[in-house]
Image (tube, rainbow, N blue to C red):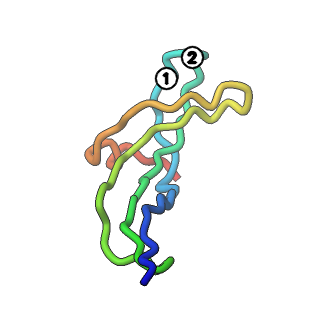
Amino acid sequence: MFVIFGFRTTVFPLGWVTMACHVCGQGRMALLREVTKFSLFFVPLFPVRTKYVAECGNPMCRTRRPASKSDSRLITH
């Protein structure tokens, strides 16, 4: 009997945050929520990890840095 399992990460964009990038200095960063789920037979069952990341809006930079859940209150649509 074969058991196929693994992990899959899905990225959810939450909005734009006014933070300065520490590499290029641009003032707009996208706040992303990354949810990693355990999968059994290619069916996602339950979340294992949730991580918040701020990604630079500059297409030449795209630097990512860790963010906290409380940074979501800074979102400007």
In this view of the protein, which residue sits in the foreground, 74 or 44?
A: 44
Crowdedness near tag 2: few (<14), some (14–19) or many (≥20) residues, C-alpha within 10 Å: few
In this view of the protein, which residue sits in the foreground, 49 or 1?
A: 1
Residue drawn at x 57%, y 32% is: 56
Residue drawn at x 42%, y 84% is: 1
Q: Are marks 2 and 1 in contact (CB under 8 Å)?
A: yes
| Residue most extreme to the bottom | 1
Dividing the picture into quadrants, the one containing residue 2 is bottom left
Q: Amino acid at mark 1?
A: Ala
Dot placed on the residue nearer the N-terminal end, 2 or 1: 1
Crowdedness near tag 1: few (<14), some (14–19) or many (≥20) residues, C-alpha within 10 Å: few
Q: Give the labeled residue for mark 2.
A: 25
State the SS at label 1. Answer: loop
Please tell me whether residue 38 is drawn above or below residue 63 in the rendered image: below
| Residue most extreme to the front | 1
Please tell me whether residue 42 is drawn above or below residue 17 in the rendered image: below
Residue 23 x, y percent position in the rendering: 55, 15
Rounded to the nearest angstrom, the CA distance separating label 2 from label 1 is 5 Å
Residue 48 x, y percent position in the rendering: 29, 61
In this view of the protein, which residue sits in the foreground, 53 or 8?
A: 8
Residue drawn at x 42%, y 70% is: 5
Dividing the picture into quadrants, the one containing residue 53 is top left
Q: Amino acid at mark 2?
A: Gly
State the SS at label 2. Answer: loop
Q: Give the labeled residue for mark 1.
A: 20
